[in-house]
Image: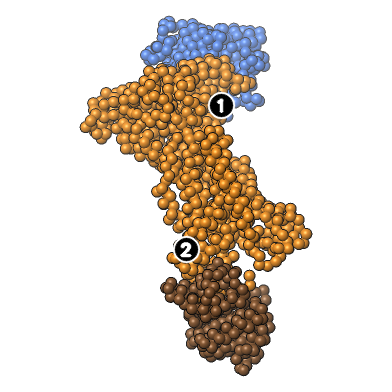
């Protein structure tokens, strides 16, 4: 499903930083993987590369057999919106849009019909347990609820891959557990491949496969 | 215009001091009327030459004369006429008739240093000179071209403005006729006027040819008078604007 | 100063493009100010220089308006003992048949006396440049030209030069070529000297002179001698120094100067909003920086000074750039402006050198500085008020502006109420203009609120059409009124300016067309010059009378237009046979009984004035004008006012008989011809040609020719006002660019998210475009409303203080509609750059922490 071959990412600045160094990795369809490591180990970079938000300096990434390198920005975006759902630590909901609108956003961007969008968005919000707060603005919701909306948005077209960057990082531990439960639940029900970047040990260990990064190199890859 | 006639007048008397010599010279050569045909040749520095001819007539004497000058050649100026009425107490009235335009005009008061119609004479050079307005000094009694002369320096009085700071005049002792003028601006000699052909006409010593040289521009103007006659009887009516317009 | 370098410079460097955009308003405003004024000054200077150079040693010039006077006046002047030299002059403009384009200014003088005043540089060095002065005078075809003109056209001494004269095209012989001197550079070297008496014939002047140039006796004061001459001649003559003619021209072109001022002030005013906007944003963005500075011990005063210094530096840089551009603009337009002013006022000058007045440049710098400081005042004060503790807390980014908005609204309503009162009791000048300014302030204060309402109102519509892009674009505006209201205000003001100008132009056009239809209704006209405002050539009365006798002509009217001083200012006199005009023309009457005023004027019992004259000179019907004629003062009551556009500065209609009697001038500028039924203008043209042949120089204009000629000049004049429109639009577009540039920075994360969840680049661009279009639409909508008010005030101002035209209020709907594509199109263009920047940025960075 996800295949990284010799992926290296360097950042050019005043000092060149190698965030990832020749990473080879394969994640099969339906896996739920946690990605851990200290700050600066390259885990977020890895996630961004897989999500097509950034491009590797060298090496290749393939999603579902499609090689990312060589795709134009727009082709990459199209691939991303069909195959990947993003969940961010800070939710990244658009503050001016209500829950329904936030969730509808990717569907609108795909040019779906209004009726279809409404149906799907309602379905998704029900799925994350927010069926009754459709017209609330993000600022009227709690952190957990916001993350649920974000998850619903990430699921818009039921993408095969869900990428979560510290999804519980900004939540208290109880809510964190709740959200993680939701993600695991969705993973099982929808057979989505899930990749969670986290530094929360509990979150990491709840995943069947745990990958650890240090200084841009995979130092551990174990399945429970 | 009429004033240059002064330069043609002639006579003889001997005098004691410079001023008396000048006054006597002027008095000696007055006549009631005069007539002649003039030729004017202007030579520029490159040797180019232009020529004009005219007819001149004057009645009346110094200070209240009237004269008419009518050009005969070249064709472009033929028929142009000047009428001058001199007054003892004020500037003269001058008119010009231009046949091509078919009208006369009053000639404006001149800046007296202006050249007279492209010649080497300035308007001032042609004026009647009132002896009272200058101081005279006898410089010596040199000989010029074999003729004994008085050499007199004339400087304008305060009351009179002149383009020249001084003029040195040579007056022949025998006939009391001025024969050479040298004009100075500051200390520089700028012009020289030489009376060349001097003859007696009707018992009056007259200059029949003179040459004015502009030493700065290196050009010179030669003026000759022919058919000179004195005391001709001419009607007053010939010296009016009406007559000018009729082309008489 | 250190702070400025440490703090401000860093910020500017980081936001270089934005900083440049910020001062662009100042640049444009100052550029227009400097450009238009420099062009104008160059034209005035060219005229003054021409006058000066031609004046030579002339100390006084004697004129009787433009009417000229009879020859005998010369003798009267010469008889004044204090006068040393007095020489007659005729000045005319002719167009030669030469290689080089452009008119030849002909200075006709009396060469026998004139050299006391002017140095013709004829006999400098070895050569005489005029071969024979006697020939020059003797031959009426003599002309003398400048070395420059000779060289340009390959003319040598004794060559022929054909000029159009009153007697048709006429061959002149070049009898002298003047060496370069002060005189020969007058009128750009396109100067020719001829004999004044020959010129009388050539230009149809009769036995008249235009002017007498005078030098006074040495040691005397020209002013004192001027008084003596005035006593000798009477009040009908003007005795002035040559330089005062330049002042007269300046006063003629003052309408243009006013226009330049309005345009540039408007540009600066709009620019002010952009600066205000930028600083307001900068203060918000730099809150934490300000907080740190405050925490480190900077006082409120220091913070305020810091921001004011920034704006001062920006203002000065902007003004300097603007001045530079302005001079370039002036270069480009001086020539055509010169032609235009020449055509409108019939004054000869050639604007070639463009030089900037240091005073003007200094003024421009001050203007830029003040604008910038005023604009930054409120943001700087806000910056000073930043609470260091709050500022250092992350997150609380937007200041709450609800309270501010309320204050604004209240103030706006108070102002509006005052405006209302000023309209009711608005007779006084102060109250009227006070109301004018308050209305602008009220409008500006209401922009944030109205803009917000409109944006909210538009959101559902936008969302319905473009669910994501539309909604986000509208939200962007709704969320940060502070970011957008400056740009919206600038745009709204621009649009209102355009609407007001459009309305004025339309109204003016309407009135001028009506006047053309009513007053200029003859079937054809004869004029001695191709250019109808040029009064160099005049028909002798004999010509006009000869033409009048031709069969097929129902009626002729002889017109002599001439500028004469009234109350010290040159005013256009239109002298014609009023009784005859009455039978054909019903001029729109503003004040007075039409029959009474025409009958009275025809009998010579008074004059009729244009309402422009009445307004500008503050004269009413019934008042008595004292006209100083060469024959002494003439008391003429104003019998009525009519609408007449003969001249921008107003006109006075006087019966020809009266004019002829007092000014002794029977020449004719224009012959108005009404044809018998069945006779066409073409037939009559042939008849005139058969009768007159080439004995006279004349040009035939049909009614249609004249109409289009006048409309062409009107167009050119209004063309100048289009510069205002262009500038206004440009400035407000810059405002939009500025706002969007800030907007994409502020919304970077939002745009990143949009891309992360699947937004294509096109969709991202789309939302920026839509934001721009929405700003454009809101600005447009507000501008339409403001424009309705601005038009009212513009018409009033024009009537009261500018042109004196009283114009009808008609909202320019067509133009308002035309603005939709213009403004939306420009808004779209403005958004292209920012939209590209938006899609180019790194997604990862955009999605990082706030």
Whether A190 is drawn above or below B160: the answer is below
Q: Residue shown at 49%/17% (left/top)? A: C633
Residue B108 lies, in percent from the top left, at: 50, 19
Residue B80 visible in rendering:
no
Mark 2 packing: few (<14 Cα in 10 Å), some, or many (20+)? some
Which quadrant would the C terminus of chain B be assigned to in this image?
Answer: top left
Chain painted brown: A
Q: Residue at x 65, y 54 (%)?
A: C379
Residue C612: % across, % down: 46, 31
Q: From the image, tell me which residue sits under label 2.
A: C460
Using the rendered view, name the quadrant where residue C674 is placed.
Answer: top left
Residue that badge 1 annotates: C241
- How busy is the neighbourhood of tag 1: few (under 14 within 10 Å), some, or many (20 plus)? many
Q: Specify the colour of chain C.
A: orange
Pinpoint residue A106: horizontal percent, then vertical percent. Answer: 49, 74
Chain B painted colour = blue
Q: Residue at x 52, y 36 (%)?
A: C424
**For this view, does C65 lie left or right of residue C18?**
left
Q: Position of residue C591 (x, y in %)?
A: 42, 27
């Amino acid at each position: 499903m996800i295949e990284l071959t010799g992926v290296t990412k360097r950042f050019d600045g005043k000092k060149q930083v190698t965030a990832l160094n020749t990473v080879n990795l394969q994640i099969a369809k339906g896996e739920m993987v946690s990605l851990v490591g200290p700050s600066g180990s390259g885990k977020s970079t890895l996630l961004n590369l897989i999500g097509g938000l950034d491009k590797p300096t060298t090496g290749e990434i393939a999603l579902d057999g499609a090689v990312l390198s060589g795709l134009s920005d727009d082709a990459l975006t199209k691939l991303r919106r069909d195959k990947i759902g993003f969940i961010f630590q800070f939710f990244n909901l658009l503050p001016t849009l209500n829950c329904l609108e936030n969730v509808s956003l990717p569907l609108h961007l795909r040019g779906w019909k209004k009726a279809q969008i409404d149906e799907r968005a309602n379905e998704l919000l029900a799925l994350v347990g927010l069926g009754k707060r459709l017209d609330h603005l993000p600022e009227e919701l709690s952190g957990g609820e916001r993350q649920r909306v974000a998850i619903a948005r990430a699921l818009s077209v039921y993408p095969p891959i869900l990428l979560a960057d510290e999804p519980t990082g900004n939540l208290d531990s109880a809510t964190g557990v709740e959200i993680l439960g939701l993600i695991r639940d969705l993973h099982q029900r929808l057979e989505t491949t899930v990749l969670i970047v986290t530094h929360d040990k509990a979150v990491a260990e709840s995943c069947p496969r745990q990958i650890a990064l240090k200084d841009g190199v995979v130092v551990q890859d174990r399945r429970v | 215009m009429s004033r240059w006639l002064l330069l043609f007048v002639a006579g003889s008397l001997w005098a004691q001091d410079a001023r008396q010599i000048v006054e006597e010279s002027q008095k000696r050569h007055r006549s009631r009327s005069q007539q002649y045909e003039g030729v004017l040749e202007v030579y520029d520095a490159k040797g180019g030459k232009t020529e004009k001819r005219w007819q001149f007539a004057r009645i009346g004497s110094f200070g209240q004369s009237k004269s008419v000058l009518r050009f005969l050649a070249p064709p472009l100026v033929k028929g142009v006429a000047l009428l001058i009425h001199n007054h003892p107490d004020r500037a003269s009235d001058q008119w010009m008739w231009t046949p091509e335009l078919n009208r006369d005009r009053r000639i404006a008061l001149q800046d007296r240093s202006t050249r007279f119609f492209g010649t080497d004479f300035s308007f001032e050079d042609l004026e009647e000179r009132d002896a009272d307005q200058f101081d005279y000094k006898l410089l010596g009694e040199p000989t010029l071209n074999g003729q004994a002369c008085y050499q007199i320096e004339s400087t304008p009085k305060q009351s009179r403005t002149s383009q020249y700071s001084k003029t040195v005049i040579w007056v022949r002792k025998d006939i009391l006729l001025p024969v050479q003028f040298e004009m100075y601006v500051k200390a520089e000699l700028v012009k020289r006027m030489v009376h060349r052909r001097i003859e007696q006409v009707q018992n009056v010593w007259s200059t029949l040819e003179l040459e004015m040289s502009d030493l700065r521009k290196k050009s010179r103007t030669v003026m000759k008078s022919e058919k000179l006659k004195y005391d001709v009887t001419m009607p007053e009516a010939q010296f009016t604007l009406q007559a000018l317009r009729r082309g008489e | 100063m250190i702070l400025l370098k440490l703090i401000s410079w860093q910020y500017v460097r980081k936001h270089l493009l934005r900083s440049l955009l910020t001062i662009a308003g100042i640049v444009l405003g100052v550029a227009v100010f400097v450009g238009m004024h420099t062009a104008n000054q160059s034209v005035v200077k060219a005229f003054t220089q021409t006058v000066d150079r031609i004046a030579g040693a002339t100390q006084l010039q004697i004129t009787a308006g433009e009417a000229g006077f009879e020859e005998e006046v010369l003798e009267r002047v010469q008889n004044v003992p204090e006068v040393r030299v007095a020489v007659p002059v005729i000045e005319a403009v002719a167009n030669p048949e030469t290689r080089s384009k452009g008119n030849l200014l002909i200075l006709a003088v009396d060469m026998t006396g004139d050299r006391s005043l002017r140095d013709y540089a004829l006999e400098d060095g070895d050569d005489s440049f005029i071969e024979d002065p006697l020939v020059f005078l003797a031959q009426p075809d003599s002309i003398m030209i400048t070395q420059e003109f000779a060289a340009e056209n390959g003319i040598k001494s004794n060559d022929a030069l054909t000029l159009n004269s009153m007697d048709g095209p006429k061959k002149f012989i070049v009898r002298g070529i003047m060496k370069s001197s002060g005189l020969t550079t007058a009128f750009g070297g396109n100067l020719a000297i001829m004999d004044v008496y020959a010129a009388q014939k050539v230009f149809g002047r009769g036995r008249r002179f235009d002017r007498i140039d005078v030098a006074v006796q040495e040691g005397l004061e020209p002013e004192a001698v001027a008084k003596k001459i005035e006593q000798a001649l009477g009040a009908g003559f003007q005795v002035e120094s040559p330089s005062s003619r330049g002042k007269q021209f300046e006063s003629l072109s003052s309408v243009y100067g006013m226009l330049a001022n309005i345009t540039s002030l408007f540009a600066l005013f709009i620019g002010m909003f952009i600066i205000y906007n930028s600083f307001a944003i900068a203060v918000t963005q730099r809150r934490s920086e300000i907080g740190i500075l405050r925490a480190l011990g900077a006082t409120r005063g220091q913070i305020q000074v810091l921001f004011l210094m920034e704006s001062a530096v920006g203002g000065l840089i902007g003004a300097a750039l603007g001045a530079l551009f302005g001079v370039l603009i002036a270069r480009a337009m001086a020539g055509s402006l010169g032609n235009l002013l020449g055509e409108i006022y019939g004054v000869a000058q050639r604007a070639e050198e463009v030089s900037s007045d240091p005073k003007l440049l200094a003024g421009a710098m001050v203007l830029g500085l003040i604008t910038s400081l005023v604009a930054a005042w409120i943001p700087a004060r806000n910056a000073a008020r930043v609470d260091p503790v709050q500022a250092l807390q992350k997150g609380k980014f937007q200041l709450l502006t609800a309270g501010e908005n309320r204050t604004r609204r209240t103030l706006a309503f108070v102002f509006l109420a005052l405006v209302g009162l000023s309209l009711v009791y608005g007779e006084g000048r102060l109250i009227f203009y006070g109301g004018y300014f308050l209305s602008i302030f009220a409008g500006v204060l209401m922009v944030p609120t109205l803009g917000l309402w409109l944006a909210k109102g538009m959101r559902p519509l936008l969302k319905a059409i473009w669910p994501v892009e539309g909604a986000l674009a509208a939200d962007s505006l709704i969320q940060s009124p502070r970011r957008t209201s400056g740009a919206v205000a600038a745009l709204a003001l621009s649009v209102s300016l355009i609407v007001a100008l459009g309305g004025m132009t339309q109204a003016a056009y309407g009135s001028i067309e009506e006047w053309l239809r009513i007053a200029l209704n003859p079937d054809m006209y004869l004029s001695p010059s191709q250019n109808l405002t040029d009064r160099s050539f005049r028909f002798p009365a004999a010509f006009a009378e000869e033409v009048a006798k031709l069969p097929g002509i129902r009626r002729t009217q002889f017109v002599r237009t001439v500028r004469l001083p009234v109350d010290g200012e040159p005013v256009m006199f239109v002298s014609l046979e009023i009784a005859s005009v009455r039978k054909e023309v019903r001029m729109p009457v503003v004040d007075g009984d039409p029959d009474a005023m025409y009958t009275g004027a025809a009998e010579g019992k008074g004059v009729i004035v244009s309402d422009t004259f009445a307004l500008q000179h503050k004269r009413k019907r019934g008042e008595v004008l004292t006209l100083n004629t060469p024959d002494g003062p003439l008391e003429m009551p104003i019998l009525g006012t009519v609408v007449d556009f003969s001249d921008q500065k107003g006109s006075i209609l006087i019966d020809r008989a009266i004019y002829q009697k007092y000014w002794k001038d029977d020449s004719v500028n224009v012959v108005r011809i009404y044809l018998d039924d069945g006779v066409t203008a073409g037939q009559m043209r042939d008849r005139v040609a058969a009768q007159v042949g080439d004995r006279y120089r004349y040009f035939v204009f049909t009614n249609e020719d004249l109409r289009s000629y006048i409309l062409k000049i009107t167009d050119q004049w209004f063309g100048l006002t289009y510069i205002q429109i262009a500038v206004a639009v440009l400035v407000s577009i810059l405002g939009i660019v500025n706002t969007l540039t800030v907007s994409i920075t502020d919304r970077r994360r939002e745009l990143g998210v949009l891309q992360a969840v699947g937004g294509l680049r096109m969709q991202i661009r789309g939302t920026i475009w839509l934001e721009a279009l929405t700003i454009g639409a809101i600005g447009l909508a507000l501008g339409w409303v403001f424009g309705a008010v601005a038009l009212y005030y513009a018409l009033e101002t024009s009537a009261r203080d500018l042109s004196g035209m009283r114009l009808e209020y008609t909202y320019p709907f067509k133009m308002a509609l035309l603005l939709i594509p213009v403004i939306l199109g420009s808004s779209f263009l403005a958004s292209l750059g920012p939209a590209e920047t938006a899609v180019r940025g790194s997604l990862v960075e955009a999605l990082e922490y706030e």
